[in-house]
Amino acid sequence: MKKRGIFSKLNNWIIYIVLTTAVAGVVVASVMLINELRKRETDRIKVFADAMKIQQSNQNIDSDTQALLFAIFTENDKLPTIITDENKTPIIEEGFYRNIPEEIIKDSIRLKRKVSNMGSLYKPFKVEISKTETQYVFYDNSELLNNLRFFPYILGLFILGYFIFSFWFLRTIKRTDEGYVWAGLAKETAHQIGTPLSSMIGWIEILRLENENSEGVKEIENDINRLKTISERFSKIGSVPELNDLNINETIQQNYDYLKSRISRKVSFMLILPKEQILIPHSRILLSWVIENIVKNAVDAMRGEGRLEIELFERNRNIVIDIKDSGSGMTRTQARNAFKAGYSTKKRGWGLGLSLAKRVIKEYHRGDIKVAQTEVGVGTTFRITMKNS
């Protein structure tokens, strides 16, 4: 079972690494694409600046060249550009700015701020019209490129969210399927126990006729009643149990009396109950099963010798049941995986007991069960919490 836990954890890490790599790859590819678009826009502005230099520095230009320059100027219908003089003062004449809103052009303060922002984003192109005249071409990203700046991160988050949702959905389906498997297994076990149990009940009646007061008959009858209880417990798994307002003190006391007579006398077994009765909705059969399962695990951890204590108390409007042992304790990994189906530190066992116990407490009683405290070589405390409503 330990190897299974290790492989399960390894698979989770592999999935995590694959998802992270995929998302990172998409983000990096998107960033590279946007950088390429930015470079192309910069190259277009450079061509625009060169065309402007040719137009303004040469008076005699043939018609073909004039048509080419006109095409270059008119092609720039997306990139915001502002041409300034050598002092970097914007020239607001027609043709010296493109794709700039009129409200900015008419506002000198906003226009200077716009030029300053452009200069901080990209270094302007210097155009030497003549030995005495210099102009600068300031430019900005197109609206499309500005919108694409956040695209890699949005896309990455979307893909990551999709993977997380898919992973959660698949795990939910898996847990649901496991729940049906355990419920079916429990019901089948109850059915299998019921067949020989019916026969045993018939034989005990025959033995009682021969010697009604026989000690052996009484003990066998007690064990038959116990088997009936076990069969009823298994049959309730997978179906909604009936929760009745019962005295939980009495439930735990009955469980304690039964267990005390059946565990090793080398175990110092104690029960601490409050003086007042506590009525709380619960299934006596299923709750007794949970406590019995934890107690048996505790006795195994102590190897049949040590101190075991069950304590019932109220805290913050909750009913708390602590089951403490002086056994071998658990590591952090063992404590974290204790309630997972199929996980067990024993050489024998299927690792279903604590998993079913958690289901009984969380799903049927709307409570919680956890490892409250554990230390290797010192012992473990299991805590069951249910609302006192």
Image (cartoon, grey):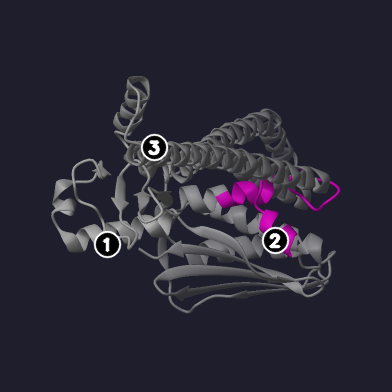
Q: Residues within 10 Å of mark 3 (few under 14, many from 20)?
A: some
Q: Is residue 151 left or right of residue 4?
A: left
Q: Residues within 10 Å of mark 2 (few under 14, many from 20)?
A: some
Question: What residue do we see at 32% from left, 21% from top?
Answer: 63
Magenta-colored stretch includes residue 349? yes
Residue 335: numbered disc: 2
Which is nearer the eye, 134 or 242?
A: 134
Amino acid tagged 2 = Ala
Q: Earlier in the sequence, mark 3 or mark 2?
A: 3
Please state if 325 lies on the left or on the right of 164 as rendered: right
Q: Answer yes or no: do the residues labelled 3 and 2 have beta carbons within 8 Å?
A: no
Residue at which label 3 appears: 54
Mark closest to the chain's N terminus, 1 or 2:
1
**Residue 233 appears at what percent x and percent y?**
58, 43
Is residue 285 at least partly visible in the picture?
Answer: no
Q: What residue occupies the far front of the structure in this picture?
A: 60
Residue behind mark 1: 113
Magenta residues (range): 332-358
> In the rendered structure, which amino acid carries the disc numbered 1?
Arg
Element under label 3?
A: helix
Q: Residue at x 42, y 39 (%)?
A: 50
Report which quarter residue 117 is drawn in.
Answer: bottom left
Q: Earlier in the sequence, mark 1 or mark 3?
A: 3
Kindly report the distance in space between the C-alpha atoms of the residues bearing marks 1 and 3: 29 Å
